[in-house]
Amino acid sequence: MKPGIHPDYHPVVFRDANTGTMFLTRSTINSDRTVEWQTPDGPRTLPLVVVEVSSDSHPFWTGNKRIVDAAGQVEKFNRRYGVRGGQ
């Protein structure tokens, strides 16, 4: 690896906005928000990144289906293109 061309790879805490679950990983992302994270050496202040969806809230991983506003989409389609009748 060439020195000086790679971004800083450091510990970051990600929090799921839907469930509040937090997990520690490493990333190159920066954040102005911070959180105290308990480590074996004591608490550490780490950058906090809030994500909308993680494996803790994604329907594929949880097995829960979310209700999608399908009725609203159908109504929008019918308003835009009209209802076909008499088939």
Image (cartoon, rainbow, N blue to C red):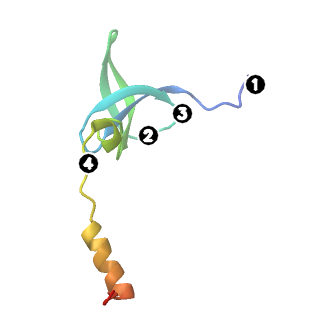
- Which residue is pictured at 32% across the width and 72% down the height? 73
Q: CA distance from mark 2 to mark 3?
A: 10 Å
Q: Amino acid at mark 1?
A: Lys
Dot 4: element: loop
Residue under pointer 2 = 31
Question: Which one is earlier in the sequence, the residue at label 2 or at label 4?
Answer: 2
Q: Nearer the viewer, residue 57 or 44?
A: 57
* Labelled pair 4, 1 in contact (Cβ < 8 Å): no
The span from disc 1 to disc 2 (Cα, nearest Å) is 26 Å
* Local SS, label 1: loop
Badge nearest the viewer, 4 or 1 = 4
**Residue 5 shown left or right of residue 42 in the figure:** right
* Residue 58 in view: no
Choose the circle earlier in sequence order: 3 or 1: 1
Q: Position of residue 66 (x, y in %)?
A: 25, 52
Q: Which one is earlier in the sequence, the residue at label 4 or at label 1? A: 1
**Image position of 54 with respect to 36: above or below:** below
Please give the label number shown on residue 2. 1
**Dot in front, 2 or 3:** 3
Alpha carbons under labels 3 and 1: distance apart: 17 Å
Residue lying furthest right? 2
Residue 78 percent coordinates (x, y): 32, 83
Between marks 2 and 4 in the image, the one whose residue lies nearer the viewer: 4
Gap between marks 2 and 4, in whole Å? 32 Å
Foreground mark, 4 or 3? 4
Q: Which residue is mark 4?
A: 65
Q: Residue furthest top?
A: 41
Question: Which disc number belongs to residue 45?
Answer: none
Badge 1: how crowded within 10 Å, few (<14), some, or many (20+)? few
Q: Position of residue 68 (x, y in %)?
A: 28, 60
Pointer 3: what residue? Answer: 28
Amino acid type, label 4: Lys
